[in-house]
Amino acid sequence: MDWTPGRIKPMEPYPHQEPFDSEKHLFEIKWDGMRLLAFIRGQEVRLQNRSLIERTNSFPELKDIHQYFQGKEGIIDGELVALDNGKPSFPLLMKRCSGSNATAASKASQIPVIFIPFDLLYLNGKELTKKPLTERKALLMDNFSKGPFIIPSPVFEEGISLFEKVKSQELEGIVAKSKNTPYLIGKKSRYWLKIKNRRKQAVVIGGYVVSSGQLSSILVGAYWEEELIYLGRVGTGFGKMERELLSLLSQLKRSIPSFDPQPKLKIDLHWVEPLLTAEIEFQEWTPDLKLRQPVFIRLLEKEPSFCRLLAGSKENNNHAEKPQ
């Protein structure tokens, strides 16, 4: 095995519908961030994402994490997150990562990141992937301590109660991991099960699509600073609201989109004034900051400025449904 950056793909979990308790599993929080492998050798730290791309220069605040690693060399699997009011925010992390390595690194003081290690694949010349998870976890805890930009992932014994806590705090979900199982490099395995909490987001309706005289989907966005960012199409959940919603939207038509930048869509659609707001439920954020599996819930009696990706005021911090 070549234990260098660009050669090792992380192990991936399978989706699972419901939380559960099991003595054969341990449970962790599913962090809403970027998967990252940290390669440490002496005072050298190199970082690689799940696509085998090196990201060392993108996150200069992590260059000294070797100071909190007691081994001579090791490979650590973990999650990189950016915090918005103490909660992981994928949109904020994408803002940090946008542009070149140099551009992303220049944002370090404005948007610092936290590395959350949760597995140890290699330590002081020894491969650990065939060791059981509990043994790898123990070695990780013995060799990695908390630092300014490092928080080792906490482990829990009960999945149902952890999921309820995660749900109440509007976090992404949990991961259940079989205790006595190996680490399968580059494999998707049922040894690890991800259980996601469907989240809510307040959005602005900026367009719609009609099919056979009925509302097929709405195009939605939210404000990021002063721009209305396109977040995708919502095509389910209208129910009895379909006719009323179509009637309202047909009275708000405009010739050009209100989204910035303009979405590139090869469909026959109608742009509308960004005046109607709605609540949608969705599974997760995609890497390009779109809503995955969105469902329309209801119209909101809120001003469009209420619908924000990154809360910009005290009022929005207290009331807005932010993506996590």
Image: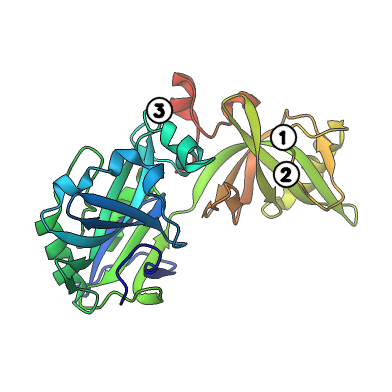
On screen, residue 99 versus residue 84, left or right, reads right
Q: Are marks 2 and 1 in contact (CB under 8 Å)?
A: yes
Q: From mark 2 to mark 3, how far is it between C-alphas?
A: 31 Å
Looking at the image, which residue is at 34% across and 71% down?
192
Amino acid marked by disc 1: Phe
Looking at the rendered structure, which numbered label has been put on residue 259? 1
Q: Position of residue 272 (x, y in %)?
A: 81, 34
Q: Which residue is mark 2?
A: 219
Q: Quadrant of residue 169?
A: top left
Q: Which residue is mark 3?
A: 110
Looking at the image, which residue is at 79% across and 34% down?
257
Question: Foreground residue, 245 or 6?
Answer: 6
> Circle 1 — which element?
loop
Position of residue 250 relative to residue 76, above or below, is above
Is there any visible trace of residue 158 in the rendered image? Answer: no
Earlier sequence position, callout 3 versus callout 1 = 3
